[in-house]
Amino acid sequence: MTGGNWRRQDFSSRGQLAEALAATVAGRLRSAIKDRNAATLAVSGGSTPALFFAALSAQDVEWDKVVVTLADERFVAEDSPRSNAGLVKSKLLQGKAARARFVPLAAPLDDIAQAAAQADAGLRLFGLPLDVAVLGMGIDGHTASFFPDAANLDNLLDPDGTALVSTVDAPSAGEPRLTLTLPIIASARFIALHIEGAEKQSALDKSLAAGSTPPIRRVLDAAQTPVEIFWAA
């Protein structure tokens, strides 16, 4: 299935999706390393990407030349079960992928604005645009931490914004968060949207309808290359 700025692939199982997405991402990373001797990868957290992380960690990539970061993060301790950094370290940065360099968004700081500024400065050191960004989506149409009820949503989704990382305070988010902003995500050389289940398929269909403007639709419309959507029941 194809739209104006997206292409969708459906898989019969979540395992097949994980293997296909891992192979696609690994291929993009290898191409970046061949062209520039380095690659950058931003991934998302939550419950959906665990199988994908395991499959990607087994791929043959020169992982010591890969920088991994997060699309967004909850401002919690890394040992919290809600930490995306903890998930990435336990599921992705294992085996072959253990050699990758990880740049977290939430440093062990007490001040979230300071953590955002530190993450922003750190990302600028590793070369932009990102080579790969793998996004997820909630049933409310949010992606990264672009929650519909975020007070600063328009700033997060400003295509002309200069910040790479921003704080997010949204009642539906559960806790304060940090997120990559629209400009850094939309400029990635390859963007994948990884969704699973009937509820998210329905939410995506609504987001793709004419006149719809939830955060995920605004990201799809702003992306500088067509977004590859990977879906399985």
Image (spheres, grey):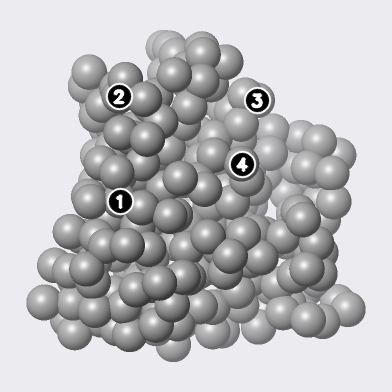
Query: Of callouts 1 and 2, which one flags the residue occurring earlier in the amino acid sequence?
Result: 2
Image quadrant where one finds the N terminus: top left
The crowd level at tag 1 (other Cα within 10 Å; few <14, some 14-19, many 20+) is: many
Q: What SS does tag 1 mark? A: helix
Residue bearing mark 3: 140
Q: Which mark is residue 11?
A: 2
Residue 233 placement (x, y as % from top left): 44, 19
The residue sitting at 32% across, 62% down in the picture is 58
Structural distance between the alpha carbons of marks 3 and 4: 16 Å
The residue sitting at 11% across, 77% down in the picture is 34
Structural distance between the alpha carbons of marks 2 and 4: 18 Å
Q: Is residue 129 visible?
A: yes
The residue sitting at 44% across, 87% down in the picture is 125
Considering only vertical position in the picture, is 111 above or below 56?
below
Considering only vertical position in the picture, is 42 above or below 223?
below
Q: Which mark is residue 22?
A: 1
Residue 109 placement (x, y as % from top left): 82, 81
Residue sitting nearer the eye, 125 or 38: 38
Query: Of callouts 3 and 2, which one flags the residue occurring earlier in the amino acid sequence?
Result: 2
Q: Is residue 158 visible?
A: no
Can you tell which quarter of the image residue 173 is in?
A: top right
Q: What SS does tag 3 mark? A: loop
Residue 152 placement (x, y as % from top left): 73, 49
Residue bearing mark 4: 47
Q: Which mark is residue 89?
A: none
Structural distance between the alpha carbons of marks 1 and 4: 16 Å
Q: CB under 8 Å between callouts 1 and 4? A: no
